[in-house]
Amino acid sequence: MQYSISQVAKASGVSARMLRHYDAIGLLTPASVTANGYRWYGRHELLRLQRILLLRRLGLGLAEIGAVLGDQVDEAAALRGHLAQLEQERRRLDRVIATVEETITDLGHARIDDPERFFAGLRKDGAAMRQQYRETFGEGAAAVFDTARAAQAGLTAADYEHAAARSAALFRRLAAVMRSGAAPEDPAALDAVAEHYESVSHFWSPTAPAYAAMGELYLNDPRQRELAERADPELPSWLARAIGAYARVRLVPPLGKA
């Protein structure tokens, strides 16, 4: 008994257009085609279609299914290859999920419940930090600090929350490099610190000595030390040395230039 393409489409849930596509790529050829172009399918073709649909549900692509049905590839081997792809995708999605979960946590920790009190504290902390920058780096750094503060004048509480979340993520990445066993002078550590330097450079382009001195703040300034310790208690010491190494290796001016 043979069935028309419309009957096969209705019974299988595969559109007639897709059945014609299967024919065009040699995946499912009708048992016969009449002079007027009508396609007819028999029992053998229906069984083949059933196998195609099963492999499709398992996630194989049409090219892979064609290889399996053509006995060019063992079905179990094809599925093992597909399984490896799925496992790789699962690992990628696990990393994405972990990143999103960490960001949600960071935003939760950075939530500002009392904006008025927060901004009052920010002004007080800002004045103390400006004084420390002036004492550590000189009047030039204090002037740059004022410029950076002016640029932040229009930021909202939500802006500060997101900035705090980004900062926490950066320290977490730095801590991960540290825990991988990278020494502060290793290229992997210097590459990680480059992201820290870039964030600083949005407001100030410190000289090598100034940036090295900034690294010492993670040891000597309670506020800066606490930020790093949230990611890892051992990070402040490692980060101070890594910033010093970055200043020596990556910020040294070319020969002949001061």
Image (spheres, grey):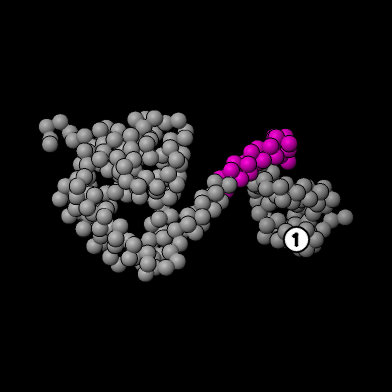
Seen in the picture, residue 181 relative to 79 is either above or below; the reply is above
Residue 132, how many percent across, how many down?
A: 24, 49
**Which quarter of the image is occupied by the N terminus?**
bottom right
Residue 84 placement, left or right of 244: right
* Mark count: 1
Seen in the picture, residue 165 relative to 245 is either above or below; the reply is below
Tag 1 secondary structure: loop
In front: 71, or 129? 129
Which residue is painted at 21% across and 45% down in the image?
Answer: 136
Seen in the picture, residue 250 relative to 104 is either above or below; the reply is above
Asked if residue 212 lies in the magenta stretch, the reply is: no
Asked if residue 67 lies in the magenta stretch, the reply is: yes
**Disc 1 packing (10 Å; few <14; some 14–19; many ≥20):** few
Q: Name the residue carrying label 1.
A: 13
Q: Amino acid at mark 1?
A: Gly
Residue 74, how many percent across, how many down?
A: 72, 34
Is residue 100 visible to us here?
Answer: no
Residue 36, how many percent across, how many down?
A: 72, 61
Residue 64 placement, left or right of 145: right
Range of magenta residues: 66-93
In front: 44, or 14? 14
Residue 165 placement, left or right of 57: left
Seen in the picture, residue 205 relative to 159 is either above or below; the reply is above
Which residue is painted at 38% across and 57% down in the image?
Answer: 163
**Which quarter of the image is occupied by the C terminus?**
top left
User: Hey, which residue is sitting farthest bottom in the picture?
Assistant: 116
